[in-house]
Amino acid sequence: MPSPRTSAPSTTTGSDALLYLLFGILGAAMAFGSLAWLTGNLTNTFVGSGTWAPFRITDALLHPEVLWPALSTSMLMVGARVVPALFTVALVVTAAVLWMRWRAGSKSGLARKADLAPLLDKEIVAKAKSLRPSLGGRESKRGPAR
């Protein structure tokens, strides 16, 4: 039996998923560029000439040799490509896991045991007696309260 729908349907099919994917790719690219700039500058500080380059994400992504000309090719590869890529992958995986947990929620639409407890005979009889004390000596239609 299919589970009941818990949210309103989208007016266009698939556009929500594509929009989320677009935002995710854009965020990952911005994170990678920022991390490439940061780790490139840190690499340049510890290994190269020691001066910080201005904050230019596109140059850090596409032309790191322009921002840090004193670094060797291998240091540029490690400092501006490998380390930020590892950080970005870790960030994307963490964000995806958190998003999946947040979106998972209660999709089944079925009530849990705690949700049904107030509807059981014992709780109904107790609530009725608290609302109307004159019902104290009477039994319910379903038999004695357990």
Image: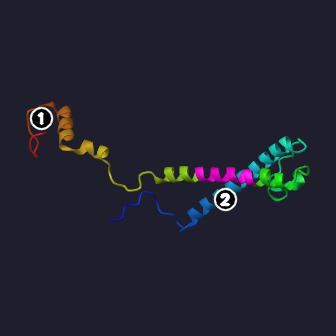
Q: Which residue is mark 2?
A: 25
Quadrant housing residue 44: top right
Amino acid type, label 2: Ile
Foreground: 117 or 50? Answer: 50
Q: Which element type, helix, strand or loop, lies under badge 2?
A: helix
Q: Mark 1 or mark 2: which comes first in sequence?
A: 2
- The reply to whether dot 1 and dot 2 touch (C-beta < 8 Å) is no
Magenta-colored span: 82-94
Residue 133 falls left or right of residue 103? left
Residue at the spot of label 1 = 135
Q: Residue at x 18, y 40 (%)?
A: 122
Q: Secondary structure at mark 1?
A: helix
Q: Main secondary structure of the magenta part?
A: helix
Counting other residues with Cα less than 10 Å from the Cα at mark 2, is it few (<14), some (14-19), or many (20 or more)? few
Q: Could you tell me which residue is drawn at 89 percent across and 54 percent down?
A: 66
Could you say where residue 144 lies in the image, as x and y percent from the top left? 9, 40
Q: Classify mark 1: residues with Cα within 10 Å, few (<14), some (14-19) or many (20+).
A: some
Q: Relative to residue 82, is residue 117 depicted above or below?
A: above
Looking at the rendered image, the quarter that the N terminus falls into is bottom left
| Cα–Cα span, label 1 and label 2 | 64 Å
Was residue 93 drawn as part of the magenta stretch in this picture?
Answer: yes
